[in-house]
Image (cartoon, helix red, strand yellow):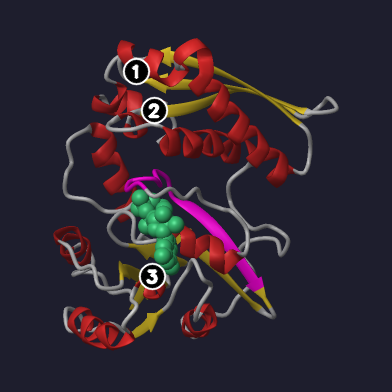
Amino acid sequence: MVALVGRPNVGKSTLVNALVGEKVSIVTPKPQTTRHRIIGVLTRDDVQIALVDTPGLHTSQKTALNRVMNETAVASLAGIDLVLFVVEAGQWRADDAAALARLEKLNTPVGLVVNKTDRVADKTELLPFIEDVAARRAFDFVVPLSAQKADNLDALIQECVAYMPEGPYLFPEDEYTDRNMRFLAAEAVREKLMMHLQQELPYSVAIEIERFDTSGEQIEIHACIWVARDNHKSIVIGRGGAMLKKIGRAARLDLVDRLGQRVDLRLWVKVRDNWIDSEASVRDLGH
Ligand SMILES: Nc1nc2c(ncn2[C@@H]2O[C@H](COP(=O)(O)OP(=O)(O)OP(=O)(O)O)[C@@H](O)[C@H]2O)c(=O)[nH]1
Ligand SMILES: [Mg+2]
């Protein structure tokens, strides 16, 4: 079990997907994309690595949703064989320091992953940055890589393998995630919403799958998009339903691709007042 932790947007989910070779976790250019603990399973030769993707740790804990996301990330550190602390090359921020501080009392080995090395044009700038971050904790190893360009991933896998205890596989060999199709469908919709919406809206939608029927020729999926305010509803629907149509189409294409079957996806938008500020609502909506 290997947990990937770090501040939002450093590329944890991109890295899990790249290592597993499947889209396990959604990715967007916006911070705070991942909200759940999601496992991606890499099985190769006689080694299986369960990669635990976590929500980005952040200090702006404005809402109950923010707090639950941080709690989810911290709780993911239990029962882990190795932690990968992920940072972005050349970008050390206050949230990185806060995330690293959360690992202070941890007895688990921690490796440092410096992601997005492709962004650094002048590679001589990389070494001083790595040295600076590496000096902040006695890391068990350091691997610079680019998750997006799949550069130096094997070096990371090699490091991880050394920390895996001997034993039977935790997951069947042909399984690449602990999440079911229903969850993947909800996440596909949320990914498109996060990509197309602006300001606070990406952070105040939640998806509930109300119907997931695989008995027919095509998979029938009914998803409810929960928003936190009345005026958000019309933004998500858009003029003449244009926004909802755009999101639905993109999510459907994505799902057809991943499920390998025709998909009939229908979306509804409903308001649950300030759900992001109520811990009960946040949990009720699957977080
Ligand atoms: N150039 C470059 N961009 C990357 C790389 N890895 C990730 N990204 C981009 O960084 C952004 C954030 O990636 P995510 O994988 O969602 O980051 P995350 O750490 O999971 O973020 P949260 O879920 O919000 O905590 C996306 O736009 C990715 O495409 C990389 O190696 N190089
Ligand atoms: Mg993520």
Q: Nearer the viewer, residue 262 or 100?
A: 262
**Which segment did they paint magenta?**
30-43
Labelled disc at residue 116: 3
- Left or right, 242 with respect to 60, comes to right
Q: Is residue 165 magenta?
A: no
How dense is the environment of label 1, judged by Cα within 10 Å: few (below 14), some, or many (20 and up)?
some
Where does label 1 land, which residue?
232
- The amino acid type found where label 3 is placed reads Lys
Mark 3 residue element: loop
- When the figure is inspected, residue 213 is found, relative to residue 138, above or below; the finding is above
Q: Residue at x 44, y 39 (%)?
A: 195
Q: Residue at x 29, y 40 (%)?
A: 68
Q: Residue at x 34, y 84 (%)?
A: 142
Q: Confirm or reject: label 1 Cβ below 8 Å from ligand 1.
A: no
Q: Is residue 35 magenta?
A: yes
Task: Decide which of tag 2 and tag 3 comes sooner along the chain.
Answer: 3
Where does label 2 land, which residue?
205
- When the figure is inspected, residue 203 is found, relative to residue 116, above or below; the finding is above
Mark 1 residue element: helix
- The amino acid type found where label 2 is placed reads Val
